[in-house]
Every structure is written in structure tokens, then in C-alpha cells.
Image (cartoon, grey):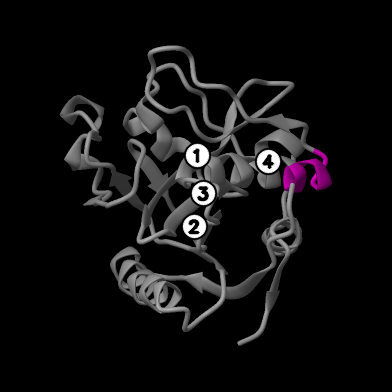
Amino acid sequence: MRERPLTLIQDDLVDYEKAMERMAALVEERQEDARPDTLWLLSHPSVFTIGKRTPTEHLPDPTHGIPVMQTGRGGQLTYHGPGQLVGYLIVKLRADEGVVDYIREVELRLVEALGELRIAAERRDTPPGSELLTGVWTKETGRKIVSIGMRASRAVTSHGFALNVDGDLTPWDLAIPCGMPDVEMTSVARERGQASMDETRRVVAQAFEAVPTE
């Protein structure tokens, strides 16, 4: 994997809509070469986000009270909530790569980070004829621990990944996550018996060669 150092921004809990506004500004800055490649680590209050092609039957029952937000990223339905580490990646793609190439790099860096957290993990190849399969799964239990959805505009990526650390997993059961009816979601805490958000942030930042400069 080639070196790709990133600038690190860190926040705690940020409202999803406010985060989208700031991410759009960061993307515009990167498109104009007014900022370096950036990793923004944060968490969101409880919210389901959906891609443009998410089927209606995959949505949660609205009586559960968790809002559903349309988003411009690729992928299907994802849940965000406290105890989950979200990473938005604002990165200018190299001339020889597309957004799917970069998603594969993101998967491998997260596999590396999970290894540092003593969780054996893997990315999976997309079955022939299927929609792009993204994310990271645990090797021992076969559960999905990371969701990924990204897009690129004018060669700059946006959106990113969601790594379940120590939050409530039950909202994942209220809808069809990632367009996969049979998927079982998991977290660092579920796989290890305990988890530290501070440790996870540090390890993930290290895996992405990300250091704070602002």
C-alpha cells in the first residue's frame, strides 16, 4: 500500500446535517487545493442514512423514532449512533485510481486497524453480477463490523466509513442494513468483550497515517 498521509480532524458528537454541510466545505477546499487530504473522525446522534437506490422495503418502521436521511454517497442503508466511529475521507484521487480503488484501500487500512485491536478481519470480493460489496467483516464470527459508502466529485472523495465500537447494536435490526437481509452487525465491544473509543480513534488514525495539524 502506497503512503498517503492525511490531516486529522477530530470531533465528538456532531449532528448529521451539520456534518454534511462541513464535509461539503472540506471537499470544495480540497478540490481547489486549499487543504490537504483529510480524515475527519466523529460520531453522530442516532440516524439512518440511505443511498439513492435504497429500496423502500429496507427502511425502518417510522414508529421507532429514528430519523432517516437521504445522502449522496454510494451504498445502501446505514445506521449511525453514539458509540460508533465515523470517518469522513476527503482525499484527492491519484491519476491512476478511481473511487472503487480507494475504497479497497480504505478496507485494507481498517483491517489493519482492527488487527491492532486484536480482531481478525477481512474485506470481501463482490460476487459476480452483484452490486459493489464494501465493508469489513470479522474472520472468526463472520459478522460485519465496518460499513463503507463513498463517492467522488472532481476527483475528490467524500463520505467514508462507520466502525461500530461500543454503541447499541439493536437499531441495526430495525431495517435492512447495507442492502443485506442476512447480515449480522457487530462491534469491537461485542467481539472483544470491551472497547475503548479513545483507543479505537488512535489506532484508526494511525492506520490512515493521519495526524492533527489544525
Q: Earlier in the sequence, mark 4 or mark 3?
A: 4
Residue at image position (51%, 57%) is 93
- Mark 2 element type: loop
Q: Are marks 4 and 3 in contact (CB under 8 Å)?
A: no
Judging by the rendered image, the residue that carries numbered circle 4 is: 108
Q: Is residue 214 above or below residue 106?
A: below
Range of residues picked out in magenta: 112-118
CA gap, disc 3 to disc 1? 13 Å
Q: Earlier in the sequence, mark 2 or mark 3?
A: 2
Nearer-N-terminus badge (1/4): 4
Q: Amino acid at mark 2?
A: Pro
Residue at left offset 45%, top offset 12%: 128
Q: Is residue 202 magenta?
A: no
Location of mark 3 (residue):
162
Q: For mark 4, give the secondary structure.
A: helix
Q: Nearer the viewer, mark 1 or mark 4?
A: 4
Q: Residue at x 77, y 32 (%)?
A: 120
Amino acid beneath label 4: Leu
Question: Disc 2 to disc 3, how far (Cα)?
Answer: 11 Å
Q: Which label's residue is closer to the chain start, 4 or 2?
A: 2
1 and 4 marks in contact (CB < 8 Å): no
Which of discs 4 and 2 lies nearer the camera? The answer is 4
Q: Residues within 10 Å of mark 2 (few under 14, many from 20)?
A: many
Q: Is label 1 in a helix, a strand or a loop?
A: loop
In percent of width and height, residue 183 lies at 48, 22
Classified by dominant secondary structure, the portion drawn in magenta counts as helix
User: Which residue is at the front of the view, 167 or 6?
Assistant: 6
CA gap between label 1 and label 4 equals: 24 Å
Q: Position of residue 36 (x, y in %)?
A: 56, 76
- Whether 116 is among the magenta residues is yes
Dot 1 corresponds to which residue?
A: 169
